[in-house]
Each structure stands twice: as structure tokens, then as C-alpha cells.
Amino acid sequence: MAGSTRYMRYILIAFVALVVIFFISASSSESRVPGADRVHSATEMLKGQGNSLWKGASSSSATSSDAGTVPAGKDSLASDAKSSPAADAVKPAASHHSSASSAAAPHASDHSTTSPNPYSGSLGGQNSLTSDTAPGPRMNATFVTLARNSDVWEISRSIRQVEDRFNHRYHYDWVFLNDADFDETFKSVTGALTSGRTRYGKIDKEHWGFPEFIDQDKAAKVREDMHERKIIYGDSISYRHMCRYESGFFFRHPLMMEYEWYWRVEPSIELFCDINYDTFQFMAENNKKYSFVLSLYEYFETIPTLWDSVKGFMKEHPEHIAKDNSMGFLSDDGGMTYNHCHFWSNFEIGNLDWLRSDAYIDYFNHLDHDGGFFYERWGDAPVHSIAAALLLPKDQIHFFNDIAYYHVPFTHCPTGEKTRLELRCHCNPKDNFDWNGYSCTKRFYELNKMPLPEGYEKEQ
């Protein structure tokens, strides 16, 4: 009996020893799992961040609103009059972010069903994956977009293109203009996507309507005729208001009056390559006043008497015509007729002081009073292009080969494989419109005695 008891005691001791050895082994093996220590530390970090991480906020974003910021969700016309972009433009504008930038991030109560993104929020914020802010001062410049509230998702796509390829390093402002009040959705969405200030302006009714010198009955008959002939936007009143506004008024809006440089951005555009330098600074340092990426021939049926009006202006104001101008881009016979070449103005980087000059204002007023914006369907692209070609020396107009751009239905993809690879382009060179027979870009090269880029023959 005593021997049996002693035997059972040995078995029990052996069992306990095995259990102890097992737990020691399990604990030791866990410590050898790669990343186990980081799992624990990451958990503690998340606990330490509290709700701010889950909401996409950071300690800096809590104090991002300052006197120069226009919070999304407020009309900027009154509050922006007090701000000074000239002062703000000399420093990165990462702090100029709307509080709406955290609106789309999950709340603390949502984390049971939504994965939190610790990098949500502004592109230019301190917690951004792309916060490689470029050093140096900034130009007094802004992006400008004419948009309706219904364009919010199309312009959102454009903003991401511009921010990802360029502005996340420079944080330039963005001015949105509309003939109606912007709604809260438009403001909050666009404000969350931009790394600079967002500013929202309403267009004066005087600048978005029929001027008193226009015969309304005559204009209506023109629209009916163009509709029957199936001319694109031929029967549209709002399109005509847009073309007239872009031709003569956007640069005089109170918000725009505070800037010297602009970059026009349209809804649903694409930028295919990185832009690793300040385009505004490039324009200023190289004495450029106007730039483009695409050029083509205008549809004749929309501008049958535009050149007659231009010739009338040249006769009335010969003092405004630049000596070394680009008439050769516009005309094949020294100015007698217009060949319809123009720069596609849905992309422009330009100088606002030039547009506000006496020369350009006299030019626009002359065209405006001739009535072609309503009696025909003059577009802002030929209007801007003719002005740049005649009022500026030709060396003040620049072609950005390295800015790859798409606006339906045309693509500018940089010519030259080396350029495309260096700039991480994702456009197909076969889609490049530059050397198409309907493009005027080759004419621009020839006029300026510029060597055609290597490899252009393969894209003809």
C-alpha cells in the first residue's frame, strides 16, 4: 500500500514538471515570433493615441485654423477679404487646412466595423504619407476652378490628380468660383482634399448674364440655328456665359485680385507625370506670361467673324500689338485670315497682371461689344490664344512638354521616353495628340525655331 502511494506521488510530480516545462517553452517560443514585440508596442501606441487617431486628427490639426483660413462650410467672400495670400504664399500652407479634412474619417464609435486609417486627413498634414514639402518661398499664386455644386465629384478627381502629382509639395491655394452659392457638400469635400487654402466665391450677376447691348431676340435665333445644325453647345446659354466670363472676368473677381499667378483646373482632368518643380516660379523666373500643353484648330462654325473683330481691335489699338509677336501661329498670310489655331485653355498657367493690363482689357472690351459671345459662340480658348499671340512677345509663351495632361478627348503625353520614365508617367505615348495633323503644336515649335523633341516621328 505504501509502495503504491509512493508510486502515485512520483507520477504526480512528473506530470507537474511536464506542465511547467510546456508553459516555459510556449512563452519562450512566443518571444521568438518575428514582430511579436512590435505587436505589443503598436497596441500600446494605439491606446495612447486615444480617439484622435481614429478620427484622422493629429495634434497639429487641432490648431490648424488661423486668421487666414477659410473653414469649409462657410462662404469665403466676406471672411477672405481680410486675408492676405501674399503673406501666406511665402510659407507652406499645410496649416491652412479646413477642419472638414477629418469629416470623412471613421469616428471612434465606428472602429468595430471600419478600419481606421492613421494617415487620413490632408495631403499636406504632418501625418501624411506624402508630406515631402518643398523648401523655399512660394509665389503669390492659386489654382482656379469654375464649377457648379453638381461638379463636386468630377472636380474631386482633378484635385487628387493635382495634389498627388504636384501640390502636396507646395500647398498652393485653390479658388472655386460659381454663379450660385456653393453648398456644404462641395465645400467640405474639396476642403478635405486640398493641401492649401480653399476659397469659395460667387460670381457677380453683371458678369454672368446678357450685357445690355446684346439683342436678346437675335441671340435666341442664333441658338436655334446652331441647334438645328447640331453645333456643340450651340444652343447653350450657360456655356456662352462661361466662355465670356473666362475670357474677361475671372481674373477680376475679388478673390482673384489678390493673386499674381493662376493655374486653371477643370473637372475630370488627369495629370500623368510628377511635377517636381514650382511651375509658378518657373514662369516668373523665365519671364513667361502664358502657357499651354495642348493646341488645336477651333471649329469654324463657332467663330465665323472673330478674326474680323480682332482685326478691328488691331486697327484701333496698334500700340498694344507686341513687336515680336506670334502672328505666324495664328495666320498663314500675315494676318489677313485666321487659321483657327489656338491653345486649349482648359489648362493654363498664366500671369494675372497681364490679363488685368490695359492691353488685354481693351482687347476683351472690343470683342465683347461686337457681340460674338452671344451672336455666335466664341470660346475663351481662341480669345485667350489670340490675345497671347498678339499682345505678348512670342518668348513669353511657354509649352510645358513635361506636364502630361488629359481632358476629354485629348491627351498630352510628354514626347521622349527618358522624360516619361524620369517623371514616373503613366500615359501611353501612342495617345499623345501633339503630332496629330489636327494639332498646332508643331507650328508653335517651328515659329519659335525650337528643335522638335527626340522621338516625335514615332508619334505622328
Image (cartoon, grey):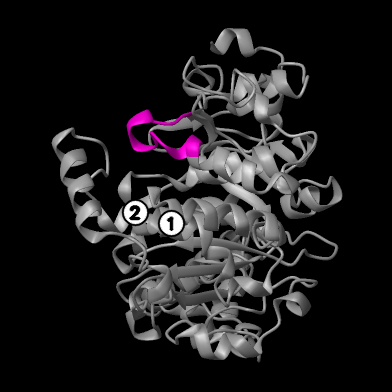
Q: How many labels does the image show?
A: 2
Badge 1 local density, few (<14 within 10 Å), some, or many (20+)?
Answer: many
* Side (left or right) of 237 relative to 277: left
Residue at 65%, 57% (x, y): give it: 355
For label 2, the residue is 240
The residue range painted magenta reads 297-308
Magenta-colored stretch includes residue 448:
no
- Is 19 rendered above or below residue 46? above
Q: In this view, does 377 lie to the left or right of 388?
A: left
Residue 243 visible in the snapshot: yes
Using the image, determine if residue 388 lies above or below residue 209.
above
- Relative placement, left or right, of 201 versus 374 is right
| Residue closest to the far top | 457
| Place of residue 299 in the rendered image (x, y in percent of width and height, measured from the top left) | 38, 30
Dot 2: within a 10 Å radius of its alpha carbon, few (fewer than 14), some, or many (20 or more) residues? many
The residue to which callout 1 is attached is: 244
Query: Considering the image in quadrants, where does the N terminus appear?
Result: bottom left
Residue type highlighted by circle 1? Arg
Reply yes or no: does residue 302 show up in magenta.
yes
Q: Residue 335 appears at what percent x and percent y?
A: 61, 27
For the residues bearing labels 2 and 1, Cβ distance under 8 angstroms: yes
Which element carries disc 2, helix, strand or loop? helix
Helix, strand, or loop for circle 1? Answer: helix
